[in-house]
Amino acid sequence: MKHKRMIAIIVVAALIALGLFLDKFDRSGSQNQEKILGADGYKVKPLKDIQPIEIFIKPEWIPFKSGERLKLELKLIELENTTISLQEVWNRGKFANDIYFSFHTTYHLDQDRGTFISNYSYNNDGTISRNHNIDDYILYDSNHNEIIIGETGAGPDSDFSFGVESDQFKDIRDGFYIKYTGMHLYEYSKK
């Protein structure tokens, strides 16, 4: 009986130690990422002023029923240590008369050096700014007919979003393309 109790105590202690280690490891990784993206102790320089991304939005990802909200979390692009996911699509019904598409950006950055894409501008004076512009979004159907975009949004971080107004729903029924030119390619290294 004492032997089983001792084994149980050792197993529980090992699981607690493993949990603490993994939590610390995860936090130090995200702290490094925050320092890199905040240019804190890192030199961040532009490699490409515009890094366009193009995504096809499938019809099954579009909720046409008023008030319907789809939490998708679909990884759509992995580029330069950056993942862009379609996080959520919401038919905002009478609230906004549109369908709103929200994209989430995550990073997988090495500690010492690497590349990433972001919709922030890293300026020569060390400041960071965002130049969010509706012209960064181009929507079109499979025949390359332009679809008029509604509201747009940016943040937090490099997340971005846009709405398609109800009078354009007929143009997105079979899916559509978005070309987003608000991203920039950067290289970083420890100072």
Image (cartoon, rainbow, N blue to C red):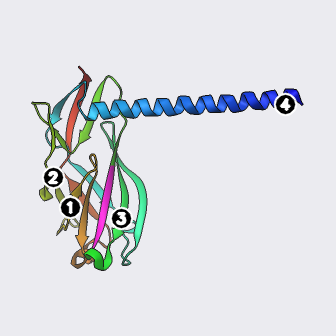
Query: Percent position (x, y) of residue 162?
Result: 24, 62
Q: Amino acid at mark 4?
A: Lys
Q: Are marks 1 and 2 in contact (CB under 8 Å)?
A: yes
Find disc 2 in the rendering and name its residue: 132
Q: Are marks 3 and 2 in contact (CB under 8 Å)?
A: no
Residue 4: which disc?
A: 4
| Residue occupying the point 70% across, 33% down | 12
C-alpha span from label 4 to label 1: 61 Å
Query: Percent position (x, y) of residue 134?
Result: 14, 59
Residue furthest right as drawn: 1
Region rendered in magenta: 98-104
Dot 2 or dot 4, earlier in sequence = 4
Residue 89: which disc?
A: 3
Dot 3 or dot 2, earlier in sequence = 3
Query: Percent position (x, y) of residue 41?
Result: 25, 24
Dot 1 or dot 2, earlier in sequence = 2
Q: Amino acid at mark 3?
A: Val
Which numbered disc, 4 or 1, marks the residue closer to the eye?
Answer: 4
Q: Is residue 101 above or below residue 123?
A: below
Q: Residues within 10 Å of mark 4 (few under 14, many from 20)?
A: few
C-alpha span from label 1 to label 3: 13 Å
